Amino acid sequence: MKSITIKSPQFINSQTGRELYENVQRHEKEKIEQIIFDLENTEKMDTLGCAWLLRIAEECKKREISFLWTGANKNVSEMLEVVSPAFEYREVEKKRIENFVIRFLYQTDKFLDEVKDFLNLCVDAIYWTILAPLSGKKFRWELFIEEIYEMGVRAVRIVCLMNFLLGLIIAMLSSAQVASFGLSIYVANLIMIGFARELAAIMTATVVSARTGAAIAAEISTMKVQEEIDALRGMGINVTQYLVAPKMLALLIVLPCLSILGLVFGLLGGSAWGILVLEFNPSVWFRQTVNSAYFEDLLQGMLKTFVFAVFIVLIGCHNGFRVSGGSRGVGLMTTRAVVMDVFMLIAVDIVFATIFYYLI
């Protein structure tokens, strides 16, 4: 073991303590395992000198060097005893690198638990929304009417406005690209096909997920935090029947209706540009629009809305039931629900595109 011994001065104060520190620093590049301070000549030491020794001890710890002293008299030794725990070098515990397989299995287990909870919620929601009412079991029709108003009627204006502006923007951009070829009339075809297949359903579902999906997650999260969910279960009430089923049925009816409105207003947005800016005759523009409408495109767009509705409600409820903590947990789960909704919209759209364009 390579070690060095440093003779200390008669009085360790601020100045001499700094000199000792600089002396240790001069050995920085040397491979030293131990530093010994010979305090035989030291008669007294003040608090500032002791502070410099502490700094030297910290420097030794960083460099994994053992720090010792010898020959201290009674006065110096008593002062050093007070701060001696700081001088002790303990080998720095290396951060254990967790085994990748263990971490992977842990995260997989968490993911599978969440998937299991989500699938259980799906089964319960489908049963209490569709099968249970048909078998004569109680359904909260009053809440169903309230949800239709909240999810549907109050969302009409924003859905119509967003789709109108989107239709206008697409008409603006596409007309600028095809104008040099003299094909501006085909902007009407583009608007019709785009909104029928994709844009009306996607844009409407995005607005609804940001509005309704977040509201569902926040509502149920707040109930969970305030222990209202536990109270309902304690009274023997099925939470899925009481809270989820009315929301599910309401959005299954509302979202396709909103999507149809989004389609109409998206076409109106494109028509506004085509008629007012491109100066097409309205009858010519609308005839071109109607002629480019195909049942398969409309069916594809409408089918998506039912799937979107189911997932928006389930994701909002799922995150609401999994909340933990207080108000911060409610905010985190609300944000998580919106993010998951948007991801779900893209994933479902990819599945539909694959089915309609590659499998059928």
Image (cartoon, rainbow, N blue to C red):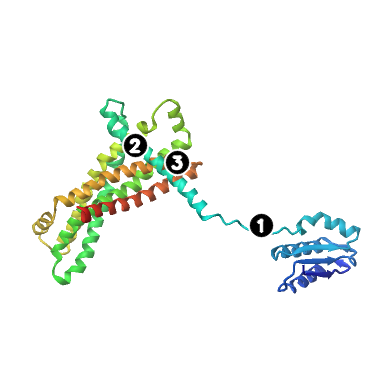
Tell me the amino acid under the disc marked 1: Glu
Q: Which residue is mark 2?
A: 123
Q: Which mark is residue 29?
A: none
Nearest to N terminus: mark 3 or mark 1: 1
Label 2 with label 1: CB-CB less than 8 Å: no
Estimate how packed mark 1 is, as few (under 14), some (14 to 19) or many (20 or more) residues with alpha carbons within 10 Å: few
Task: Determine if residue 199 is in view.
Answer: no
Label 3 with label 2: CB-CB less than 8 Å: no
Residue at 21%, 64% in the rendered image: 174
Estimate how packed mark 3 is, as few (under 14), some (14 to 19) or many (20 or more) residues with alpha carbons within 10 Å: some
Q: CA distance from mark 3 to mark 1?
A: 36 Å
For the image, the number of numbered tags is 3
Q: CA distance from mark 2 to mark 1?
A: 49 Å
Quarter holding residue 65:
bottom right
Q: Which mark is residue 322?
A: 3
Of tags 3 and 2, the one toward the viewer is 2
Secondary structure, mark 3, is loop
Q: Which residue is mark 1?
A: 93
Residue at 45%, 36% in the rendered image: 224
Of tags 3 and 1, the one toward the viewer is 1
Residue at 89%, 68% in the rendered image: 10
Tell me the amino acid under the disc marked 3: Arg
Expressed as whole percent of the image width and height from the top left, the position of residue 206 reads 31, 50
Tell me the amino acid under the disc marked 2: Val
